[in-house]
Image: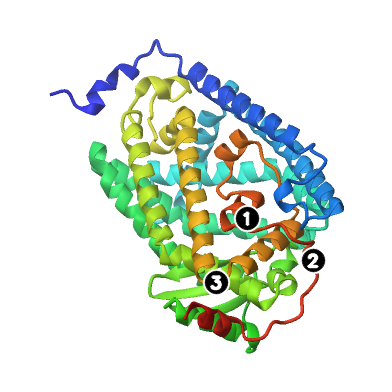
Amino acid sequence: MVSYIDSLSILDNPKINWKLIIVGFTIGQYVFESYLDYRQYKVLTKKSPPASIKAEVNQETFDKSQKYSRSKAKFSFFNSTFDLLQNLAVIKYDLLPKVWGWSGYAMSKAAFLLPKFMGGVITQSLIFIITSQILGTIVGLPLSYYQNFVLEAKYGFNKQSIGLWITDTLKKIGLLIVLGSPVIAGILKIIDYYGNSFIFYLMGFILLINLIAMTIIPTLIMPLFNKFTPLEDGELKTAIENLASSQKFPLTKLQVVDGSKRSSHSNAYFTGLPWSKQIVLFDTLIEHNSTEETVAVLAHEIGHWRLNHIPKMLTMGQFHLFIIFSLFNAFVHNKSLYNSFGFYNQQPIAIGFTLFNDILRPLECILDFSQNLISRKHEYDADKYALNCGYSEELARSLIKLSNENLSSMNADWLFSAYHHSHPILPERLSALGYVSKEKISIDKPEKVEEVVEKKVEKQE
């Protein structure tokens, strides 16, 4: 019986022009996504908000939202064009083998500093990946600067200083070196050691890393970038604890993050292991929402937990990895692929995965589309959960405030939304909640509300 790998050996053919194929896939994806951006841009020229939220959103806020979204769309188009030209330059000028060669040279020069076990292809691969990431970061600094200090600042969202921006960039590079290197080395070692049988071993390793990350990111990584402080005793804390208790949510920490030092955007989320959860509120969310509205947002988040959305997404992620690794298994030793890009004497796994990532573009688009469909369903389900907890009105008001405050897009082309959006847009969520358009909703700091969760519990009883 012919194996799956053997059946795809026909792809290892020196007559196949892999460079041309990858260039075609790269340009094809760019053209398709640019077409979607064009469709969305036309929607962003509309002069009035959707009828479902016309009573809640004033014309000035809507106009500013449309203008902000158009500015982001223009920047996104420029950014994707820049990425395309960068990718084509890497291919045309054979930069991959040049950086790979330099990585080997750097490894040989630093050999006296490295432990004996840190030699060979894996160490060279780490140097190659880290070098590529640093070069990519440097090349992208002007665009990052423009996005933060021109585009976001123009609409009043950017709050970070240049010093903080630089520090964040250096911290990310440091984390890649300190934490990313062992993970990358483990992935390369598993593929090298287990040969064509690496798929399930690698899936298990990545699942383990994800579970570890869920533990260390909230406690060790996030505090490197933001200050987390316990929510002060008071009405809001009591209301959230009562909600968590009534829903049997294993709340162990309730924190406030100083998101306002970087941006005026607001949000809330929870992290942690199944038996120990930490709720994090942005200080900007607390500033603009009433107690009931903040609790409604957390009822939505608890809905994600209660409905097992995280395990479901982890499972889907594993299935995603299975498809990718199964296909990669057919390319990892494809000599014609390596030869097309100037690798004649070596077939480094890191290079193989880099090239395979470009070949995977059409399938990855389909997989991402499917993942977004499921993600949007999860958002609807979590909204419904909050509705069943008695927070329909408060959640709707909070969503409107968040949309106004963040100048979120209030219109979307259906095809653009289906391809890009992991969350439904505001009118879609309000419609699913059964919200009836009523009145303008202020985003000013509200007066506190008394007896929040107790009132909801009584209503349910």
Mark 1 or 2: in front is 1
In the rendering, at what x and y percent does residue 356 appear?
43, 31
Numbered tag placed on residue 390 in the rendering: 3
Q: What element carries label 3?
A: loop
Q: In this view, does 414 lie to the left or right of 186?
A: right
Q: Is mark 2 on a helix, strand or loop?
A: loop
Mark 3 or 2: in front is 3
Instruction: Tell me the kind of residue under disc 2.
Output: Ser
In the rendering, at what x and y percent does residue 169 appear?
66, 55
The answer to the question of whether label 1 and label 2 lie on touching residues, with beta carbons closer than 8 A, is no
Q: Is mark 1 on a helix, strand or loop?
A: helix
Tell me how the rendering is colored.
Answer: rainbow
Q: How far apart are marks 3 and 2 (CA)?
A: 22 Å
Instruction: Tell me the kind of residue under disc 1.
Output: Leu
In the rendering, at what x and y percent does residue 106 appear?
52, 43
Numbered tag placed on residue 442 in the rendering: 2
Q: Which of marks 1 and 3 is nearer the N terminus?
A: 3
User: How many numbered circles does the render carry?
Assistant: 3
The N terminus, quarter of image: top left
Q: Earlier in the sequence, mark 3 or mark 2?
A: 3
Q: Residues within 10 Å of mark 3 (few under 14, many from 20)?
A: some
Residue drawn at (69%, 67%), measured in percent from left and top? 259
Determine whether 29 is above or below 114 in the image: above
Q: Distance between the residues labelled 1 and 2?
A: 17 Å
